[in-house]
Amino acid sequence: MNPALAGLLSALFYGVGDFLSGLSGRHDAPLRIAALTHPIAALALLALALLLGAPLPPASDLWWGALAGAIGLGAVLAFYRGLALGPMGPVSVGAGALSAAVPVAFGVLGGEVLGALGWTGAAGILSGTVLLSLIPGGTGQGGVSAKDNGVLLGLVAGVGFGFYFVALGQAQSAAGLLWTLAAARLASSLIVVPIAALTMGLRPSRPALLLASAPGDTLGNLFYLMAVQGGGLALAGLLTSLYPALTTLLAVIVLRERLRASQWGGVVLALAGAALLTAG
Protein backbone atom coordinates (compact mmCIF):
# COMPACT_ATOMS: atom_id res chain seq x y z
CA MET A 1 0.00 0.00 0.00
CA ASN A 2 1.10 3.55 -0.70
CA PRO A 3 2.70 4.83 2.56
CA ALA A 4 1.00 8.23 2.31
CA LEU A 5 -2.39 6.54 1.96
CA ALA A 6 -1.57 4.26 4.90
CA GLY A 7 -0.67 7.29 7.04
CA LEU A 8 -3.91 9.05 6.14
CA LEU A 9 -5.92 5.89 6.90
CA SER A 10 -4.16 5.67 10.27
CA ALA A 11 -5.21 9.25 11.04
CA LEU A 12 -8.76 8.46 9.88
CA PHE A 13 -9.17 5.42 12.13
CA TYR A 14 -7.54 7.10 15.14
CA GLY A 15 -9.74 10.19 14.70
CA VAL A 16 -13.01 8.31 14.21
CA GLY A 17 -12.12 5.92 17.04
CA ASP A 18 -11.53 8.85 19.41
CA PHE A 19 -14.86 10.40 18.45
CA LEU A 20 -16.78 7.15 19.00
CA SER A 21 -14.94 6.56 22.29
CA GLY A 22 -16.01 10.02 23.39
CA LEU A 23 -19.63 9.26 22.55
CA SER A 24 -19.40 5.92 24.35
CA GLY A 25 -17.92 7.70 27.38
CA ARG A 26 -21.11 9.73 27.70
CA HIS A 27 -23.04 6.53 28.44
CA ASP A 28 -20.47 4.28 30.13
CA ALA A 29 -17.69 4.79 32.67
CA PRO A 30 -14.17 5.01 31.20
CA LEU A 31 -13.14 2.04 33.35
CA ARG A 32 -15.81 -0.18 31.77
CA ILE A 33 -14.97 1.03 28.25
CA ALA A 34 -11.29 0.16 28.71
CA ALA A 35 -12.16 -3.18 30.31
CA LEU A 36 -14.22 -4.18 27.29
CA THR A 37 -12.19 -2.70 24.43
CA HIS A 38 -8.62 -3.47 25.53
CA PRO A 39 -9.04 -7.27 25.48
CA ILE A 40 -10.56 -6.95 21.99
CA ALA A 41 -7.54 -4.92 20.89
CA ALA A 42 -5.14 -7.43 22.47
CA LEU A 43 -6.76 -10.35 20.62
CA ALA A 44 -6.82 -8.40 17.34
CA LEU A 45 -3.12 -7.49 17.64
CA LEU A 46 -2.19 -11.09 18.47
CA ALA A 47 -4.18 -12.29 15.46
CA LEU A 48 -2.47 -9.73 13.21
CA ALA A 49 0.97 -10.73 14.48
CA LEU A 50 0.23 -14.37 13.69
CA LEU A 51 -1.39 -13.59 10.35
CA LEU A 52 1.48 -11.40 9.17
CA GLY A 53 4.09 -13.79 10.50
CA ALA A 54 5.74 -11.17 12.70
CA PRO A 55 8.81 -12.58 14.48
CA LEU A 56 8.77 -12.76 18.25
CA PRO A 57 10.81 -9.93 19.79
CA PRO A 58 13.20 -10.34 22.74
CA ALA A 59 11.56 -10.83 26.13
CA SER A 60 12.77 -7.38 27.17
CA ASP A 61 10.64 -5.83 24.41
CA LEU A 62 7.55 -7.59 25.73
CA TRP A 63 8.28 -6.32 29.25
CA TRP A 64 8.65 -2.77 27.88
CA GLY A 65 5.33 -3.28 26.11
CA ALA A 66 3.69 -4.42 29.35
CA LEU A 67 5.06 -1.36 31.18
CA ALA A 68 3.77 0.88 28.38
CA GLY A 69 0.35 -0.73 28.69
CA ALA A 70 0.20 -0.06 32.44
CA ILE A 71 1.23 3.58 31.91
CA GLY A 72 -1.10 4.02 28.96
CA LEU A 73 -4.09 2.70 30.88
CA GLY A 74 -4.13 5.74 33.16
CA ALA A 75 -3.83 8.00 30.13
CA VAL A 76 -6.69 6.21 28.37
CA LEU A 77 -8.99 6.56 31.39
CA ALA A 78 -8.26 10.29 31.62
CA PHE A 79 -8.72 10.64 27.86
CA TYR A 80 -12.09 8.88 27.76
CA ARG A 81 -13.33 11.01 30.65
CA GLY A 82 -12.05 14.15 28.95
CA LEU A 83 -13.76 13.26 25.67
CA ALA A 84 -17.02 12.59 27.52
CA LEU A 85 -16.86 15.99 29.24
CA GLY A 86 -15.75 17.72 26.05
CA PRO A 87 -15.45 19.66 23.96
CA MET A 88 -14.05 16.71 22.01
CA GLY A 89 -12.01 18.71 19.50
CA PRO A 90 -9.71 20.55 21.94
CA VAL A 91 -9.47 17.46 24.17
CA SER A 92 -8.22 15.34 21.27
CA VAL A 93 -5.90 18.03 19.90
CA GLY A 94 -4.32 18.72 23.29
CA ALA A 95 -3.78 15.03 23.97
CA GLY A 96 -2.33 14.44 20.52
CA ALA A 97 0.03 17.40 20.70
CA LEU A 98 1.48 16.50 24.09
CA SER A 99 1.77 12.82 23.16
CA ALA A 100 4.07 13.96 20.34
CA ALA A 101 5.99 16.45 22.49
CA VAL A 102 6.91 14.20 25.44
CA PRO A 103 8.98 11.67 23.43
CA VAL A 104 10.77 14.54 21.69
CA ALA A 105 11.61 16.09 25.07
CA PHE A 106 13.08 12.77 26.21
CA GLY A 107 15.06 12.56 23.00
CA VAL A 108 16.51 16.06 23.46
CA LEU A 109 17.42 15.30 27.09
CA GLY A 110 19.14 12.16 25.83
CA GLY A 111 21.30 14.11 23.43
CA GLU A 112 19.24 14.21 20.24
CA VAL A 113 19.41 17.44 18.23
CA LEU A 114 16.16 19.23 17.42
CA GLY A 115 16.20 21.34 14.27
CA ALA A 116 14.66 24.76 13.69
CA LEU A 117 11.35 23.24 12.52
CA GLY A 118 11.26 21.05 15.61
CA TRP A 119 11.77 23.95 18.02
CA THR A 120 9.16 25.99 16.14
CA GLY A 121 6.74 23.07 16.41
CA ALA A 122 7.45 22.70 20.13
CA ALA A 123 6.66 26.39 20.63
CA GLY A 124 3.43 25.95 18.67
CA ILE A 125 2.38 23.00 20.82
CA LEU A 126 3.16 24.87 24.03
CA SER A 127 1.22 27.96 22.90
CA GLY A 128 -1.67 25.88 21.58
CA THR A 129 -2.06 23.79 24.72
CA VAL A 130 -2.03 26.93 26.87
CA LEU A 131 -4.90 28.35 24.80
CA LEU A 132 -6.76 25.04 24.89
CA SER A 133 -6.44 24.72 28.67
CA LEU A 134 -7.82 28.15 29.56
CA ILE A 135 -10.82 27.53 31.81
CA PRO A 136 -13.75 29.93 31.48
CA GLY A 137 -14.81 31.54 34.74
CA GLY A 138 -18.18 32.71 35.87
CA THR A 139 -19.51 29.46 37.28
CA GLY A 140 -20.18 30.91 40.68
CA GLN A 141 -17.33 28.99 42.28
CA GLY A 142 -14.41 30.70 40.58
CA GLY A 143 -14.38 28.49 37.47
CA VAL A 144 -14.43 24.85 36.50
CA SER A 145 -12.49 22.33 38.58
CA ALA A 146 -9.72 20.34 36.92
CA LYS A 147 -11.56 17.03 37.34
CA ASP A 148 -14.59 18.45 35.51
CA ASN A 149 -12.66 20.10 32.68
CA GLY A 150 -12.33 17.88 29.64
CA VAL A 151 -9.47 19.81 28.05
CA LEU A 152 -7.29 19.64 31.16
CA LEU A 153 -7.94 15.89 31.39
CA GLY A 154 -6.98 15.65 27.72
CA LEU A 155 -3.66 17.36 28.47
CA VAL A 156 -3.03 14.98 31.37
CA ALA A 157 -3.83 12.10 29.03
CA GLY A 158 -1.43 13.50 26.42
CA VAL A 159 1.44 13.44 28.90
CA GLY A 160 0.54 9.85 29.79
CA PHE A 161 0.42 8.86 26.12
CA GLY A 162 3.80 10.50 25.67
CA PHE A 163 5.32 8.29 28.38
CA TYR A 164 3.54 5.33 26.77
CA PHE A 165 5.36 6.04 23.51
CA VAL A 166 8.64 6.57 25.36
CA ALA A 167 8.29 3.11 26.93
CA LEU A 168 7.39 1.54 23.57
CA GLY A 169 10.40 3.28 22.07
CA GLN A 170 12.70 1.24 24.29
CA ALA A 171 11.75 -1.90 22.35
CA GLN A 172 14.63 -3.00 20.12
CA SER A 173 12.84 -5.10 17.49
CA ALA A 174 10.88 -3.08 14.91
CA ALA A 175 9.75 -6.28 13.16
CA GLY A 176 8.20 -7.57 16.39
CA LEU A 177 6.34 -4.36 17.24
CA LEU A 178 2.92 -6.00 16.83
CA TRP A 179 3.82 -8.43 19.61
CA THR A 180 5.02 -5.54 21.77
CA LEU A 181 1.74 -3.66 21.19
CA ALA A 182 -0.20 -6.83 22.00
CA ALA A 183 1.76 -7.14 25.26
CA ALA A 184 0.79 -3.56 26.10
CA ARG A 185 -2.90 -4.21 25.57
CA LEU A 186 -2.74 -7.54 27.39
CA ALA A 187 -1.10 -5.90 30.43
CA SER A 188 -3.70 -3.13 30.58
CA SER A 189 -6.47 -5.73 30.20
CA LEU A 190 -5.13 -7.78 33.11
CA ILE A 191 -5.26 -4.65 35.28
CA VAL A 192 -8.52 -3.05 34.23
CA VAL A 193 -10.83 -6.03 33.66
CA PRO A 194 -10.77 -7.35 37.27
CA ILE A 195 -11.12 -3.84 38.71
CA ALA A 196 -14.10 -3.01 36.49
CA ALA A 197 -15.72 -6.39 37.08
CA LEU A 198 -15.50 -6.00 40.87
CA THR A 199 -16.50 -2.33 41.10
CA MET A 200 -19.13 -1.72 38.42
CA GLY A 201 -19.66 -4.82 36.29
CA LEU A 202 -18.93 -5.28 32.60
CA ARG A 203 -22.37 -4.85 31.06
CA PRO A 204 -22.26 -1.80 28.76
CA SER A 205 -25.12 0.66 28.38
CA ARG A 206 -24.59 1.06 24.62
CA PRO A 207 -22.85 -2.13 23.42
CA ALA A 208 -23.13 -1.28 19.71
CA LEU A 209 -21.48 2.11 20.19
CA LEU A 210 -18.75 0.64 22.37
CA LEU A 211 -17.99 -2.11 19.84
CA ALA A 212 -17.91 0.45 17.04
CA SER A 213 -15.24 2.41 18.89
CA ALA A 214 -13.01 -0.63 19.51
CA PRO A 215 -11.40 -1.08 16.05
CA GLY A 216 -10.09 2.50 15.83
CA ASP A 217 -7.00 1.91 17.96
CA THR A 218 -6.08 -1.42 16.34
CA LEU A 219 -6.59 -0.28 12.74
CA GLY A 220 -4.84 3.00 13.45
CA ASN A 221 -1.83 1.06 14.76
CA LEU A 222 -1.86 -1.29 11.77
CA PHE A 223 -1.90 1.44 9.13
CA TYR A 224 0.69 3.42 11.10
CA LEU A 225 3.04 0.43 10.96
CA MET A 226 2.38 0.07 7.22
CA ALA A 227 3.20 3.75 6.71
CA VAL A 228 6.42 3.40 8.73
CA GLN A 229 7.52 0.35 6.77
CA GLY A 230 6.77 1.98 3.43
CA GLY A 231 7.78 5.60 3.98
CA GLY A 232 9.67 5.95 7.24
CA LEU A 233 8.92 7.46 10.63
CA ALA A 234 8.81 11.09 9.51
CA LEU A 235 6.12 10.58 6.86
CA ALA A 236 4.09 8.23 9.06
CA GLY A 237 4.29 10.50 12.10
CA LEU A 238 3.41 13.62 10.12
CA LEU A 239 0.31 12.14 8.50
CA THR A 240 -0.88 10.25 11.57
CA SER A 241 -0.58 13.42 13.68
CA LEU A 242 -3.53 14.80 11.68
CA TYR A 243 -5.95 12.50 13.55
CA PRO A 244 -7.16 15.12 16.08
CA ALA A 245 -8.40 17.22 13.16
CA LEU A 246 -10.78 14.38 12.24
CA THR A 247 -12.11 14.19 15.80
CA THR A 248 -12.59 17.96 15.88
CA LEU A 249 -14.37 17.96 12.51
CA LEU A 250 -16.75 15.16 13.57
CA ALA A 251 -17.51 16.91 16.86
CA VAL A 252 -18.34 20.16 15.06
CA ILE A 253 -20.48 18.46 12.37
CA VAL A 254 -22.24 15.75 14.40
CA LEU A 255 -22.43 17.26 17.88
CA ARG A 256 -22.54 20.92 16.78
CA GLU A 257 -19.75 21.76 19.19
CA ARG A 258 -18.97 25.46 19.34
CA LEU A 259 -15.47 26.48 20.32
CA ARG A 260 -14.33 29.85 21.58
CA ALA A 261 -12.01 31.84 19.31
CA SER A 262 -9.06 31.17 21.63
CA GLN A 263 -9.75 27.42 21.48
CA TRP A 264 -9.79 27.49 17.67
CA GLY A 265 -6.47 29.30 17.85
CA GLY A 266 -5.15 26.62 20.18
CA VAL A 267 -6.36 23.87 17.83
CA VAL A 268 -4.55 25.43 14.87
CA LEU A 269 -1.33 26.09 16.81
CA ALA A 270 -1.23 22.62 18.37
CA LEU A 271 -1.93 20.80 15.09
CA ALA A 272 0.61 22.88 13.21
CA GLY A 273 3.12 22.41 16.01
CA ALA A 274 2.67 18.63 16.00
CA ALA A 275 3.23 18.56 12.23
CA LEU A 276 6.38 20.72 12.44
CA LEU A 277 7.71 18.77 15.41
CA THR A 278 7.35 15.51 13.52
CA ALA A 279 8.89 16.94 10.35
CA GLY A 280 11.75 18.63 12.22
Image (spheres, rainbow, N blue to C red):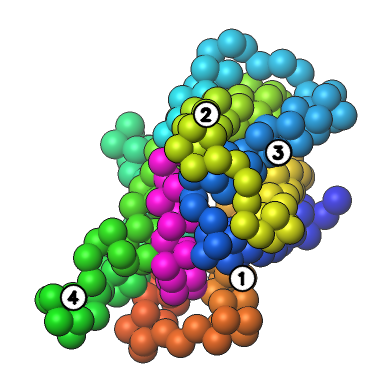
Residue 215 in the image: x percent, y percent?
Answer: 72, 50
Residue visible at 18% across and 75% down in the picture? 143
Mark 3 in CB contact with mark 2 (< 8 angstroms): no
- Given the image, on which type of amino acid does mark 2 rest? Pro
Where is residue 80 drawn, in percent x and y? Answer: 48, 55
CA distance separating discs 2 and 1: 33 Å
Q: Which stretch appears magenta?
A: 72-90
Callout in the foreground (1, 3): 3
- Find the distance from the CA under tag 3 to the CA under tag 2: 15 Å
Ranked by sequence position, the earlier of labels 3 and 4 is 3
Residue at numbered disc 2? 194
Which residue bears the numbered disc 4? 143
Q: Which residue is mark 3?
A: 40
* Residue lying at 56% horizontally and 77% vertically, measured from the top left: 251
Verify whether residue 76 appears in magenta: yes
Please report contact status of discs 2 and 4: CB closer than 8 Å, yes or no: no
Q: CA distance from mark 1 to mark 3?
A: 23 Å
Of badges 4 and 1, nearer the viewer stands 4
Mark in the foreground, 3 or 2: 2
Disc 1 element: helix
Q: Secondary structure at mark 4?
A: loop
Amino acid carrying mark 1 in the image: Leu
Secondary structure of the residue carrying numbered label 2: helix
Tell me the element at label 3. helix
| Residue assigned mark 1 | 246
Q: Earlier in the sequence, mark 2 or mark 4?
A: 4
Is residue 152 rendered to the left or right of residue 51? Answer: left
Inspect the image, locate mark 3, and give the three-letter code of the amino acid beneath it.
Ile
* Magenta stretch: dominant secondary structure: helix
